[in-house]
Image: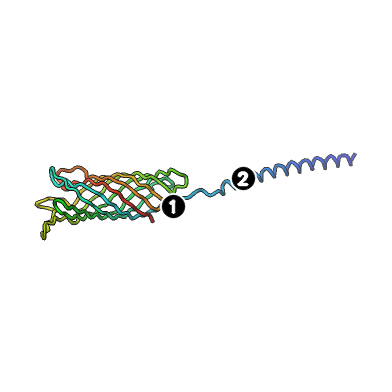
Amino acid sequence: MITTRIRMALFVMLLGLNAYAQYDDTYDVEEWTLDEEEATPKPQHKEYKNAFYLQYSPSRYKVDAGDRIRFNEMLVGYSRFIEVVEDTPYFVEVGANMKFSWETSDLKARVLTFRIPVNVMYKWYPWKEKDYAIAPYAGASIRAIAMAREHTGAKSTSLIGSPYDWHHFQVAWQTGVRFFFNRFFLGISYSRDFRDSSKYPGVRECGVHFGVGF
């Protein structure tokens, strides 16, 4: 009788150990699977916070009530990209640029301009790798004309003040789109002074620029 009870007790213990072993193995497999999923690295993309760029821009300057003069312009600039929300591709772009403008047909003018632009930019990534992006932007800028002179033969006359009454300072708006290729970008833009009939020149600028981030 005692032997039978001992046998039954051993049988029950073996069944329990077997069930526990099966449960323990299943638990380990699940944990291993979760650990593997969590350990999978997410693709990372480096956002460059600074950039230098060069721009060519044919422009039109409105110099009085009716006349408009065409200028060719070369510009060098610096931008700082500030991410507004973490892990979201919205940026505020601030910076400064210097532009040299020349005109050959009428005034034979030379103009040196400094600007401070502020833009809001959004980056759209067509592919998961995030090596390429399309980034529309828009904003405003303050312009300061440091030098503007007309050259007639050996004579050079300032365009700031009388008799031309050009103003040093003006505010403009701009918009455009950039195409990012890793650290490099290519962009097109359009800029125009806010309408103010009391201030000349009124500038309309189309531009193509190339830049590199760092």
Secondary structure, mark 1, is loop
Instruction: Report the amino acid beneath label 1.
Output: Lys
Q: Which residue is mark 1?
A: 46
Is 157 or 50 nearer to us in this picture? Answer: 157
Query: Where does label 2 land, which residue?
Result: 33
> Which is in the foreground here, disc 2 or disc 1?
1
Q: Is residue 35 left or right of residue 196?
A: right
Q: Residues within 10 Å of mark 2 (few under 14, many from 20)?
A: few
Res 198 quadrant in image: top left
Nearest to N terminus: mark 2 or mark 1: 2
Q: What's the amino acid at mark 2?
A: Thr
The residue lying toward the viewer, choosing from 81 and 157, is 157
- The residue under the point 22% across, 45% down is 204
The tally of labels here is: 2
Q: Position of residue 134 (x, y in %)?
A: 38, 45
Say left or right for 211 vs 18.
left
Q: Nearer the viewer, residue 147 or 30?
A: 147
Q: Residue furthest right?
A: 1
The color scheme shown is rainbow
Residue 83 percent location from the top left of the image? 39, 49
Instruction: Reply above or below: 153 against 66.
Output: below
Q: Which mark is residue 147?
A: none
Return the x and y of residue 47 as percentages of the image width and height. Answer: 41, 51
Residue that extends furthest to the bottom in the rendered view of this protein: 154
| Residue at the far front in the pictured view | 105
Q: Residue at x 76, y 41 (%)?
A: 16
